[in-house]
């Protein structure tokens, strides 16, 4: 297996796995058939990338670079002065690094031609096996569910209106008291001596 990623549902139950598998190219079709037998295939797609030209080109570059390294090594054996040795060693290390890089590419290309990549997604779809009871118990269950949903709806409405009601009370009460004082008739003083 080259890679694996998994996902769980809200209850922590594994419900999806994405896998990247490497299988021998000779067994590719059998591997696909075996994997298809695990469940229902919803989508299957195949593509191929021809790396033959890259393999041939890389092999030729490896041979040429190996010959160049061998030639530099022969020059190093004939070098007499420190200046000649340093110059040839610099060239040798540069060409050896290039050869090592080409050989790594060669290994990668060999892997690409001998192994195939399969990307597989496995999903678990939960099926509700419980059925609601019929008759009185079914009606009672639906009634409780409706009561809970109604309570939530009423609570949501009260929660939405409450801030506006508090604001109206805080601003409206002082305004009402002020208006009431202005409208109230002044009480005339009582006549003296009566």
Image (cartoon, rainbow, N blue to C red):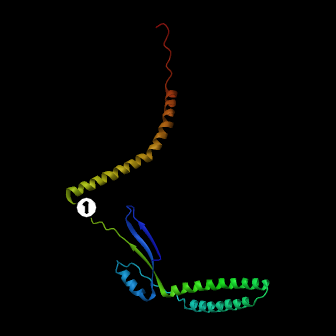
**Residue placed most toward the observer, 113 or 154:** 113
Q: What residue did someone put label 1 on?
A: 132
Count neighbours of disc 1 (C-alpha within 10 A) and say few if under 14, some if 14 to 19, many if 20 or more. Answer: few
**Residue placed most toward the observer, 128 or 85:** 85
Q: Which residue is found at the position 43% from the left and 89% from the top? A: 26
**Residue placed most toward the observer, 11 or 170:** 11
Rendered-image quadrant of the N terminus: bottom left
SS under mark 1: loop
Q: Quadrant of residue 7?
A: bottom left
Residue 80 position in % (x across, y down):
78, 88
Q: Which residue is found at the position 25% from the left and 61% from the top? A: 132
Residue 49 position in % (x across, y down):
52, 87
State whether residue 182 is above or below residue 7: above
Q: Residue furthest top?
A: 193
**Residue placed most toward the observer, 115 or 148:** 115
Image-based side of 139 in relation to 32, left or right: left
State whether residue 17 is above or below residue 118: above
Residue 107 position in % (x across, y down):
55, 85
State whether residue 157 is above or below residue 42: above
Q: Which residue is found at the position 59% from the left and 86% from the top? A: 103
Image-based side of 62 in relation to 181, left or right: right
Q: Residue furthest left?
A: 135
Image-based side of 11 in relation to 71, left or right: left
Q: How many marks?
A: 1
Q: Which residue is found at the position 38% from the left and 68% from the top? A: 15
Residue 173 position in % (x across, y down):
48, 34
């Amino acid at each position: 297996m080259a890679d694996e990623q998994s996902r769980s549902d809200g209850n922590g139950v594994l419900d999806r796995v994405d896998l990247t598998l490497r299988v021998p190219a000779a067994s590719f079709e059998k591997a696909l058939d075996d994997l298809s037998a695990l469940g229902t295939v919803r989508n299957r797609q195949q593509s191929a990338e021809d790396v033959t030209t890259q393999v041939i080109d890389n092999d030729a570059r490896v041979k040429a670079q190996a010959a160049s390294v061998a030639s530099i090594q022969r020059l190093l054996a004939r070098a007499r002065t420190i200046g000649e040795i340093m110059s040839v060693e610099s060239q040798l290390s540069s060409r050896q690094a290039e050869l090592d890089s080409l050989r790594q590419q060669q290994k990668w290309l060999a892997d690409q031609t001998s192994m195939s990549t399969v990307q597989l997604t496995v999903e678990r779809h939960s099926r509700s096996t419980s059925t609601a009871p019929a008759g009185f118990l079914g009606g009672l269950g639906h009634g409780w569910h409706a009561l809970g949903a109604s309570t939530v709806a009423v609570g949501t409405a009260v929660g939405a209106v409450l801030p506006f009601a508090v604001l109206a009370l805080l601003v409206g009460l002082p305004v009402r008291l002020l208006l009431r004082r202005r409208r109230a008739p002044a009480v005339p003083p009582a006549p003296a001596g009566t």
